[in-house]
Image (cartoon, rainbow, N blue to C red):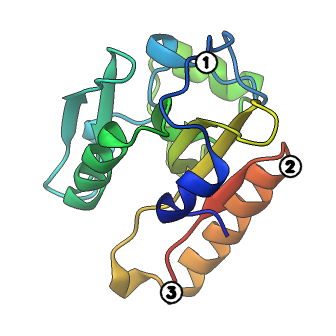
Amino acid sequence: MISIDTFPKYFVPNPIVSLPERDVFGVLHGRAYVPTYGPEHSKTAMAGCEYDVKTGGQTVFHSLLEAALDLKLALSPYVIEARPHYPMSLDKRVKRRLGFGERLLTSELPTIDRVLTLQSRDDGSLHLHGISVKPEDQLRDDAVTRRHKREELYMASRGGSSIHPR
């Protein structure tokens, strides 16, 4: 199983790559990527935006757990980019509503907390890795377990991987 601790085994450190405009799911890379949900969608009192040292854009966090993970990812030599609140759908109706600035319910557009772009040691290809950020007391909840399974299947559908703390 791939985790932050096993990145040295699977991925290239300090990769020098040109990212395509979009990834295998059709989502924008780099500074062009805009997080699906900003801090105003947070269910906690601790939410905000930070400068992203890897892309020069911004990253959004909805909890202290996400902010702490963002710092760890920013310092990792293996991570090319970490896109927060990554959409699990690019349905045309949803894209149009987002384009008009409409607020969506999180149930209308599920997201993965973080999707990382890494470079594979095997063949140099780009690899996407999803990370779910949840407090430990929520990990046994049936709804969270179902969500993690959906995220895992979504990432695997295009050759990506994901990790959900158990």
Residue kind at label 1, given as amino acid type? Leu
Pick the front one: 85 or 156: 156
Disc 2 residue crowd, few under 14, some 14–19, many 20+, Cα 10 Å: few
Residue kind at label 3, given as amino acid type? Asp
Q: Residue 157 carries which label?
A: 2
Distance (Cα) linking label 2 and label 3:
25 Å
Q: Do the residues labelled 2 and 1 touch (CB within 8 Å)?
A: no
Pick the front one: 87 or 82: 82
Can you say whether 71 is above or below 9 in the image? Answer: above
Q: In which quarter of the image is the N terminus?
A: bottom right
Where residue 12 appears, as percent x and y from the top left, is 59, 38
Where residue 28 appears, as percent x and y from the top left, is 61, 18
Q: Name the residue under label 3.
A: 141
Residue kind at label 2, given as amino acid type? Ser
Where residue 126 appears, as percent x and y from the top left, is 71, 31
Q: Which of marks 2 and 1 is nearer the N terminus?
A: 1
Residue 89, quarter of picture: top right
Q: In this view, does 41 lie to the left or right of 105?
A: left
Pick the front one: 151 or 120: 120
Residue in the image at 44% along x and 32% along y: 103
Which label sits in the foreground, 3 or 1?
A: 1
Can you say whether 136 is above or below 101 in the image? Answer: below
Q: In this view, does 65 lie to the left or right of 36?
A: left
Q: Can see residue 163?
A: yes
Where residue 58 appears, as percent x and y from the top left, is 30, 23
Disc 3 residue crowd, few under 14, some 14–19, many 20+, Cα 10 Å: few
Q: Name the residue under label 1.
A: 28
Q: Do the residues labelled 2 and 3 touch (CB within 8 Å)?
A: no
Q: Which of marks 2 and 3 is nearer the N terminus?
A: 3
Q: Which of marks 3 and 1 is nearer the N terminus?
A: 1
